[in-house]
Amino acid sequence: MQESILVVDVGSGTQDMLLYQPGKNLENCPKFIVPSQTQIAAAKIRKATAQRKHVFLHGFLMGGGANGAAIKAHLASGLNAYATPQAALTFNDNLAVVEEMGIILCDKAPDPAVPIWLGDIDRPALKQAFAAFGLEYPVKTAVAVQDHGYSIKESNRTLRFQLWKDFVMQGGNLKKLVFKEDIPEVFTRMRSVREIVPGAILTDTGTAALLGIMADDYVKPHLNQGILAVNVGNSHTLVAAIRGERVFGIFEQHTSMLNTESLSQLIRRFQAAELTNAEIYEQGGHGSALHPEMSPGWNYIAVTGPRRSMVKSLNWYEAAPYGDMMLTGSFGILAGLEIT
């Protein structure tokens, strides 16, 4: 008999959660859309800054973004920021760079400093929330985070896209990127989540979003011919050419660097199998990778993501598996586990 699973898709703005309960319609399973941990940590840092208090960051490597901006503002205000080496890796894989930012590495909180826990999954808070609604906290957990990969030699956006390119060239099966057991050493953010939640299943948010689009009942009939799956996230936009269960091409750009026209132009070049890695990278994005077998076409376009309104005027199909766009990634994780 299948167990209940807590499925969490961690974004830069929100963490989108589904409590999968076997035997219940997915539409009726409990759902939570709440601020992501980076937003929560950033708010705590900003509060300390406003109160003119130093901070001590401890816990685990987690996603950056909002918390990184908050800590830079905190330091710029003349206040101190202390961090354990493990928590400090949130801001850069190279701890020497972290120290250059002005963060002071130490193992214990100096006095006085406000302690702030870092981590992508706050289990005590989740257990408290579940208990408040009379829900049993599940034994199994599956989590998606955006993991750029670990490197102290090259930029994270370069490494992240090299990992995507290797994936495309090696067969492009998204389900192989859902890690039930061993997580490759390069994915330090995923490994950090597993430290917090032992035994958790991990994958990338991009993988989860693409699998979620493929799980939409209106998208499924087009998969044999081939689709473009577009995830317009709060921070990143990921586009993949998918036929059957195989990804033939992929590109990723920062959403803040796109508008309706620029994304439409990139899509047209991608459909023509002409979009180069240099075009994306030189614009400040991650890159583009096309398998040699990717031929022009890919006319059916399905879009999801919290910033999908950017392309509303283009009349692309708006994917919403099981009627809930915000849980596209969570449903994608379940699809990757072959549960849905």
Image (tube, rainbow, N blue to C red):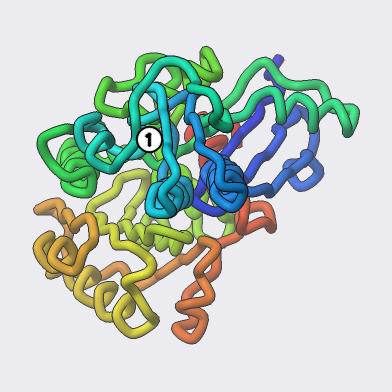
> Is 288 placed left or right of 7 in the picture?
left
The residue positioned 71% from the left and 14% from the top of the image is 1
User: Height in image: 67 above or below 121?
Assistant: below
Q: Who's the residue at 38% across and 66% down the image?
A: 255
In the rendered image of this protein, does residue 153 appear above or below residue 320? above
Residue 14 horizontal/vertical position (percent): 59, 50
Tag 1's secondary structure?
Answer: loop
**Image quadrant in which you'd find residue 319:** bottom right
For the C terminus, the quadrant is top right
The percent coordinates of residue 31 (x first, y second) are: 74, 43
Q: What count of labels does the image hold?
A: 1
**What residue sits 33% from the left and 85% below the top?**
261
Q: Which residue corresponds to mark 1?
A: 90
> Is residue 331 in view?
no
Give the x, y percent position of residue 84: 40, 22
Instruction: Say which quarter of the image contains residue 15.
Output: top right
Tell me residue 118's x, y (percent): 51, 31
Q: Which residue is drawn at the image coordinates 69% and 58% (left, top)?
A: 323
